[in-house]
Image (spheres, rainbow, N blue to C red):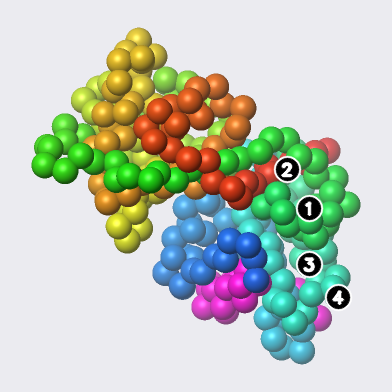
């Protein structure tokens, strides 16, 4: 077995390994090289803090690490089906945790499907505990009403994030933190509400939406929601179920909670 940090030339190999490792998951994840490169950049993955393992020259397992100040995150881990139950997943995880600790991280987090018992057991052995559940939402009807002109306009993402933070966007999971969201397009309803997300095919994936606290309960959030691009809207399974008002709003605009949820797990690095 060879285990080493990621290199820039590994992206093609990593994409194939990632798709193999997640091919039998309840929610399969398929990324081509371009999409994977964007994800690595978007979530702050550091190649020096990540590991890829080879067995007899074949890509076998990977673990992706990222650090922001004293906080760290495992941004993905997987093992090719044919190399499971050989300890290779534990090996890459151990090396990444050591690298994150050496980089100054005091706490590390990750997300894992609540039904992935094998992964949860592995992370538990390394001190991770469940902090909260992360939920996703789908919508039965298109967001926009046909034949209407939307007052929602694209805006500078950094400007939108300034408002988002000022309006109370706190304690977000890694993929919903401003450092991640800055890579995505933003939209606004005047100076009253902002949203951040990305169009994938005909579906707009909504990552963040907030309304000026002084103007809430006036339907502005719903109006912004209806003005988002795309034929339909989806919310990935990243919304903490303890966020006050989130579920209430999403249900009010026609959302249905997805069956599959994730656990956000954290561990102390001290």
Q: Which residue is mark 2?
A: 265
Of marks 1 and 2, which one's residue comes earlier in the chain? 1
* Residue at left offset 63%, top offset 62%: 26
Left or right: 270 in relation to 22: right
> Answer yes or no: do the residues labelled 2 and 4 have beta carbons within 8 Å?
no
Tag 2: Cα neighbours inside 10 Å, few (<14), some, or many (≥20)? many
Q: Which residue is mark 3?
A: 89
The reply to whether residue 98 is visible in this rendering is: no
As helix, strand or loop, the secondary structure at mark 1 comes to helix
Of marks 4 and 1, which one's residue comes earlier in the chain? 4
Which mark's residue is nearer the viewer, 1 or 2?
1
Left or right: 81 in relation to 76: right
Of marks 2 and 4, which one's residue comes earlier in the chain? 4
Tag 1: Cα neighbours inside 10 Å, few (<14), some, or many (≥20)? some
- Please give the range of residues in magenta: 1-23
Q: Nearer the viewer, residue 55 or 231?
A: 231
Which mark's residue is nearer the viewer, 1 or 3?
1
Tag 4: Cα neighbours inside 10 Å, few (<14), some, or many (≥20)? few
As helix, strand or loop, the secondary structure at mark 4 comes to loop
As helix, strand or loop, the secondary structure at mark 2 comes to strand
Of marks 1 and 3, which one's residue comes earlier in the chain? 3
């Amino acid at each position: 077995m060879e285990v080493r940090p990621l290199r820039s030339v590994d992206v093609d190999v990593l994409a194939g390994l990632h798709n193999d490792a997640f091919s039998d998951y309840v929610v399969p994840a398929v990324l081509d090289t371009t999409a994977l490169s964007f994800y690595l950049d978007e979530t702050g993955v550091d190649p020096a803090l990540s590991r890829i393992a080879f067995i007899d020259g074949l890509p076998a397992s990977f673990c992706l690490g990222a650090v922001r100040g004293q906080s760290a995150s495992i941004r993905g881990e997987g093992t090719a089906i044919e190399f499971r139950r050989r300890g290779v997943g534990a090996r890459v995880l151990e090396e990444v945790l050591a690298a994150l600790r050496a980089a100054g991280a005091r706490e590390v987090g990750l997300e894992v499907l609540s039904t992935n018992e094998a992964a949860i057991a592995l992370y538990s052995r390394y001190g991770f505990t469940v902090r909260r559940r992360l939920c996703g939402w789908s919508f039965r009807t298109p967001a926009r009403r046909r034949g209407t002109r939307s007052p929602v306009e694209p805006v500078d993402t950094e400007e939108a994030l300034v408002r988002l933070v000022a309006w109370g966007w706190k304690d977000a999971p890694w993929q919903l933190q401003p450092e991640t969201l800055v890579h995505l397009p933003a939209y606004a309803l005047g100076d009253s509400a902002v949203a951040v997300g990305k169009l994938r095919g005909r579906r707009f994936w909504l990552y963040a939406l907030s309304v000026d606290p002084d103007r809430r309960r006036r339907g502005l959030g719903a109006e912004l929601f209806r003005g988002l691009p795309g034929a339909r809207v989806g919310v990935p399974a990243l919304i903490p179920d303890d966020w006050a008002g989130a579920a209430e709003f999403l249900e009010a605009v026609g959302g249905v909670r997805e069956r599959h949820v994730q656990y956000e797990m954290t561990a102390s690095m001290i």
